[in-house]
Amino acid sequence: MSSNKVIVIGGNAGGMSAASQLRRLSPDAEIAVYEKGPVISYSACGIPYYVGGMILDRERLIARTPESFAEKNIQVRTMHEVTAIDMEAKTVAVKNLTDGRTFTDRWDKLLIATGASRVKPPIPGIDADGIFMLSTVESGVAMRKWIETHNPRKALIVGGGYIGLEMADSLSCMMGIDLTILEVAPQLMATLDADMAEFVQKNLESRGVSVRLGEGIEEFVVRDGRVVGAVTKNGRYDADVVLMALGIVPNTKIASDVGIRTGIKGAIVVDETMKTSARDVWAAGDCVQSTNLITGKPMHLALGAVANKQGRAAAFSMSGQREDFPGVLGTAVCRVCGQEIARTGLLEREMIAEGTPYAAVTVRGRTVADYMDYVGYMHVKMIAETPSERIVGAQILGDVGSAKRIDTMAAVITAKMTLEEMLYLDFSYAPPISPLWDPIQQAARSLISKIRG
């Protein structure tokens, strides 16, 4: 029997990244992965585009199969749910969801990568046919099949975050379905400042999407088991299909049940090596909390790229080596009805909450030289501490070619650069690729002038 048995609970980004890296670092380790769903290593971010028809084959969403991991001597069992952890005996209880049988498996080291689940509020009628919560490949397949079968005329999206707006792109801008978005908050996209979120709303409304802020669902109207509408404080909205996109909660009950420390939103607390409060137990992915690189405070961020990096760091630690996961800025991008949206670092309201003096500007710039016939435009918002002029946040909205500039801003913020240091970075220039003064450097120049008067 192996004295280096590793069990991974969860077979998506964090878990499979850790398993793969651990195999490279510890060739002799026995590695077993238990995943309660039917597939592993799938792209949750690609599901809205599958529903909208941009991706025709569901298999394109699946990056790796259990068989591909078997070739690396990593045992992966799908449709197997870990129901409990015994810390003293160092075992897990496992249920085979196909035949109902249960068994135990032992471990020397354990990685919890159980992910997160979509919020499902107790709204009357929420279990009716035609109401979906996209979180797995199967849920995407089911929603696409429903749309193809029932040809809905009216759709309703409840929630104005990333998944909701990406599905707005699919349902309205790609498929032409009459769409209403309901958001209980006073703005779309809580990860943006309100002034930038207003640009997102105006773009959606210009494409025929109805956006209703400050409205939450009180009940769904159901007929013959199918959803036909929803009721809010302001009245009824007809709908043939509904997407619930109210955010996520970390899946951490299995950890908290054995006393593993949890924190913000119930996410598992880990150190920079992804170790939990329990001996020989690590965690990675959407079930853990991260550290904000600017404030040093905990935050919960559910992104595949983050989960992959956390899995890598966990594998190094589990192998007896060390490669820390330093934290996050919340860097994210998406595209909604032709508009690219990007953000990183802190928002104005977060600077206010921190009590940190700051200045912010928003500039309008071009994607390429203004004499090119395919020139596009963007808005760049930049935030810096005062009087240090250290850059702490950026938000970008615009035409094709705008959003990936946020990666430069993430690097600048991570490096703790000042506005002047960024202003004189040696950026490239060619008329068909960029303007002479890149919009993010225009924003830095404008912010310097504002701060220095």
Image (cartoon, rainbow, N blue to C red):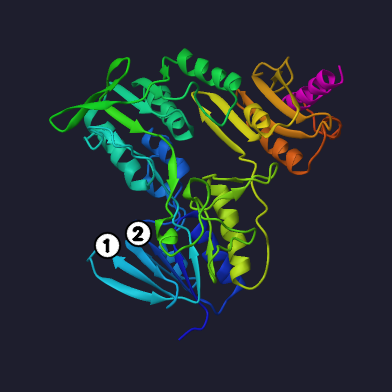
The quadrant the C terminus occupies is: top right
Local packing at callout 1 (Cα closer than 10 Å; few below 14, some 14-19, many 20+) is some
**Which mark sits nearer the N-terminus, 1 or 2?**
2
Type of amino acid under label 2? Lys
The residue drawn where x is 33% and y is 57% is 38
- Asked where in the image residue 401 lies, by quadrant, the reply is top right
Type of amino acid under label 1? Leu
Q: Nearer the viewer, residue 109 or 44?
A: 109
Left or right placement of residue 153 versus residue 209 in this view:
left
Residue for badge 1:
97
Residue 441 visible: yes
Q: Quick check: 16 above or below 136?
A: below
Magenta stretch: residue 437 in it? Answer: yes
Left or right placement of residue 32 versus residue 408 in this view:
left
The residue drawn where x is 62% and y is 61% is 313
Residue 130, position as x, y percentages in the image: 25, 33
Query: Mark 2: which secondary structure?
Result: loop
- Asked where in the image residue 400 lies, by quadrant, the reply is top right
Residue 436 visible: no
Local packing at callout 2 (Cα closer than 10 Å; few below 14, some 14-19, many 20+) is many
The residue drawn where x is 50% and y is 22% is 187
Residue for badge 2:
36
Asked whether the residues under the numbered discs 1 and 2 touch, taking CB atoms below 8 Å apart as contact, a structural biologist would say: yes
Query: Mark 1: which secondary structure?
Result: loop
Magenta stretch: residue 96 in it? Answer: no
Task: Point out the stretch of residues depicted in magenta.
Answer: 431-453
